[in-house]
Image (cartoon, rainbow, N blue to C red):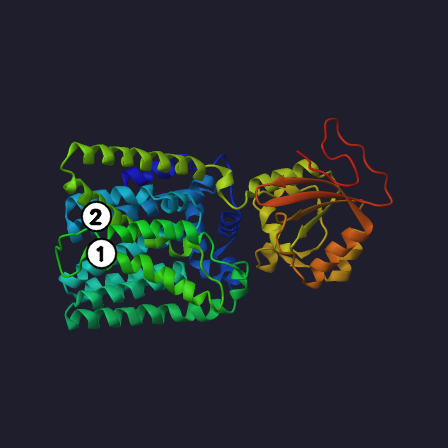
């Protein structure tokens, strides 16, 4: 727990930057609970419980980057303690200690320990539910199964894909050949969890367009690399201390959630590494067991030297990874940099255009960045419309408003990003192409901020030293 907290606090502000999904949490947590509920009827229902929790935390401790991310730090430290206790119960104190220390060092865990999202909380709940499962197998009692069921249900309500851990638990019990009363108790509990999740799953399925951005598995290779290391460590013999053996628990929780998401992706791409973050519980347990086995095998000075070199190499890799994860570039975008760029290149009275309208959330965390600009497409703001990005005007009205301005600041995705094809976005792009010319583009982490000027206006003079003076468009630094 202490190691996880220390690593979580190290560089937690990431140079006072915030990425897009965190910005959504930050914005919605500022809304009233009734507004969060009404917004969830249109979008992000799957994260509604997390937004409500963060709303209460903001109310108690104030809003800010530390308040946004500290719950994840504390949740992941709780997950680390559960991993240590699982190792202790399944294989003894040394493996428990090693597994608990390995867990916070894993790159995925380090990353999401500092995210203002629900994934660390889900990981903690799944870890403690897994511990409750192991205890429930040996100390069969209804209240223990109730604790297991409630913990798993809460994890699922925070993020639906936590239910895949339930499948892994079932396979573990079947392979372990636990007594029938235990298997029956788990079956009843699992049925209750699924029944409790079902209404959320049905309603949120209507919002499946939210994951349309997933066209291929996201960061699958990094996840598989860690999973392969973990599964390879399963070959190390581990003395059993109860009916459930450590590899029989750890391997399913690594393999099955990932495999099921990949199978589902054959129909609709759904795999994102953070959706199965809790698989790192199994990786840490197996790596801890493998380290213990290697320590016991060490009988010669040669082996000791090899172990020392390997440990130094792994430690160096983890330090370099940790340094990278605490930079703004480690995230797919940086909304603070995007907003600051809009403020820098925009002039009072300029028009502001988002391509697409969903990108409005990139500048919504700090309204001062866009205070003196006019949002050309906005018909109703996000709060009053109970949406994430507001409601936009019809396409003809957007085009008409654009022609009222001589300068427009456009915020859009990175080069190569797929352009939306709905009429409103087509009206924006076609009007820019016909009546405006690009004056300069600033590339920031995850976005482009472009200034356009009307064709009938003379080309503005470039600032001294600018790299983008001409009508052909360049790059504003």
Q: Quadrant of the N terminus?
A: top left
Say whether residue 82 is visible.
no
Give the answer, above or below, for where 140 lies relative to 234.
Answer: below
At 20% from the left edge and 55% from the top edge, which residue is drawn? 246
In this view, the residue in front, 219 or 404, is 219
- 445 with respect to 245 (left or right): right
Answer left or right for 279 relative to 31.
Answer: left
- Label 1: few (<14), some (14–19) or many (≥20) C-alpha neighbours in 10 Å: many
Q: Which mark is residue 233?
A: none
Instruction: State which quadrant residue 454 falls in.
Output: top right
Whole-percent x and y of residue 24? 52, 51
Q: What is the number of callouts on the image?
A: 2
Q: CA distance from mark 2 to mark 1?
A: 9 Å
Name the residue rendered at 69%, 37% in the picture. 475
Residue at the front extreme of this rendering? 302
Return the residue at label 1: 247
Q: Nearer the viewer, residue 462 or 190?
A: 462
Q: Residue at x 14, y 42 (%)?
A: 296
Within 10 Å of the Cα at label 2, are there few (<14), some (14-19), or many (20+) other Cα atoms? many
Report if the CB atoms under discs 2 and 1 are less than 8 Å apart.
Answer: yes
Report the quarter where the C terminus lies: top right
| Numbered disc 1: secondary structure | helix
Point out residue 312 in the picture as x, y percentages from the top left corner: 30, 33
> Which structural element holds mark 2?
helix
State whether residue 21 is above or below residue 180: above
Q: Is residue 10 visible?
A: yes
| Sooner in the amino-acid sequence: mark 2 or mark 1 | 1
Indicate the position of residue 34 as horizontal and vertical percent values: 50, 59
Q: Which mark is residue 289?
A: 2
């Amino acid at each position: 727990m202490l190691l996880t907290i220390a690593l979580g606090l190290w560089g937690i502000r990431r140079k006072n930057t915030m990425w897009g999904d965190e910005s959504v949490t930050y914005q919605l947590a500022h809304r009233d609970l009734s507004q969060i509920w009404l917004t969830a009827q249109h979008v992000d229902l799957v994260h509604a419980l997390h937004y409500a929790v963060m709303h209460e935390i903001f109310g108690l401790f104030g809003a800010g980057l530390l308040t946004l991310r500290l719950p994840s730090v504390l949740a992941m430290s709780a997950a680390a303690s559960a991993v240590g206790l699982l190792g202790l119960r399944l294989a003894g104190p040394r493996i428990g200690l090693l597994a608990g220390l390995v867990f916070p060092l894993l790159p995925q865990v380090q990353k999401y320990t500092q995210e203002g999202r629900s994934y660390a909380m889900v990981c903690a709940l799944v870890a403690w539910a897994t511990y409750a499962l192991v205890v429930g197998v040996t100390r069969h009692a209804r209240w223990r199964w109730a604790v297991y069921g409630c913990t798993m249900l809460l994890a699922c309500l925070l993020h639906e894909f936590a239910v895949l851990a339930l499948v892994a638990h079932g396979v573990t019990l079947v392979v372990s050949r636990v007594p029938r009363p235990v298997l029956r108790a788990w079956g009843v509990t699992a049925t209750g969890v699924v029944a409790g999740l079902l209404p959320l799953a049905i309603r949120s399925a209507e919002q499946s367009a939210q994951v349309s951005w997933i066209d291929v598995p996201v960061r699958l290779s990094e996840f598989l690399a860690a999973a392969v290391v973990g599964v390879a460590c399963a070959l190390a013999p581990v003395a059993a201390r109860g009916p459930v053996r450590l590899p029989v628990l750890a391997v399913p929780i690594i393999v099955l959630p990932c495999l099921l998401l990949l199978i589902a992706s054959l129909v609709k791409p759904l795999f994102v590494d953070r959706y199965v973050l809790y698989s790192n519980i199994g990786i840490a347990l197996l790596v801890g067991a493998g380290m213990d086995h290697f320590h016991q095998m060490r009988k010669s000075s040669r082996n000791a030297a090899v172990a020392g070199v390997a440990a130094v190499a792994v430690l160096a890799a983890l330090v370099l990874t940790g340094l990278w994860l605490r930079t703004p570039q480690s995230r797919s975008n940086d909304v603070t940099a995007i907003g600051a760029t809009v403020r820098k290149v925009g002039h009072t009275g300029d028009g502001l255009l988002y391509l697409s309208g969903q990108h409005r959330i990139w500048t919504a965390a700090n309204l001062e960045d866009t205070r003196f600009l006019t949002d050309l497409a906005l018909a109703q703001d996000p709060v009053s419309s109970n949406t994430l990005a507001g409601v936009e005007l019809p396409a003809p009205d957007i085009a008409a408003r654009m022609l009222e301005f001589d300068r427009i600041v456009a915020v859009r995705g990175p080069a190569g990003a797929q352009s939306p094809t709905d009429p409103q976005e087509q009206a924006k792009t076609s009007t820019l192409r016909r009546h405006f010319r690009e004056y300069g583009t600033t590339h920031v982490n995850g976005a482009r901020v472009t200034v356009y000027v009307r064709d009938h206006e003379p080309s503005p003079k470039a600032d001294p030293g600018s790299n983008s003076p001409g009508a052909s468009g360049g790059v504003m630094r």
